[in-house]
Image (cartoon, rainbow, N blue to C red):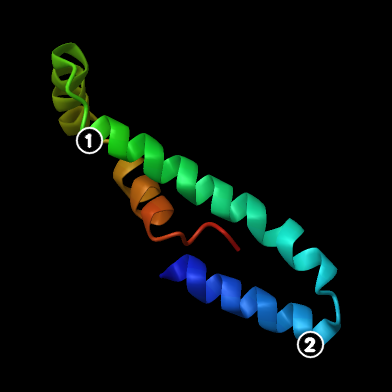
Amino acid sequence: MNTGIQDGYALDRAFATGQLDGYEAQRRPVAQRVVAFTDRTTRVATTRNEIARAARNIALPLLGHTDMPKKLATELAELNYR
């Protein structure tokens, strides 16, 4: 949702400034980053490999004691694509 709102804002700014040519160059990297991040997290969450699953299940609680949850929340909320 946040990416769509940001896309709308960027498109509005491009219309307002007459710089429509730069819209795709500005927003495509964001879309690629969102898709890549979603793909990685989905693969980690749904792995069928027992060793990878065990490593994930050990690592996640440990990472919970770092600043990683805040970074992931920011990434998931797409608040770092400004």
Q: Position of residue 12 (x, y in %)?
A: 68, 83
* Residue 68 drawn above or below residue 31: above
Q: What is the CA distance from the residue labelled 2 to the residue labelled 1?
A: 42 Å
Report helix, strand or loop for mark 1: helix
Q: Nearer the viewer, residue 21 or 53?
A: 21
Q: Residue tagged by mark 2?
A: 16
Whether residue 67 is visible to the viewer of this picture, yes or no, is no
Residue ID at (75%, 57%): 25
* Residue farthest bottom in this picture: 16
* Residue 71 drawn above or below residue 48: below
Q: Position of residue 53 (x, y in %)?
A: 16, 22
Q: Position of residue 78 (x, y in %)?
A: 45, 59
Q: Position of residue 23 (x, y in %)?
A: 74, 67
Quarter of the view holding residue 16: bottom right
**Mark 2 is on which residue type?**
Ala
**Mark 1 is on which residue type?**
Ala
Tag shown at residue 73? none
Q: Residue tagged by mark 1?
A: 45
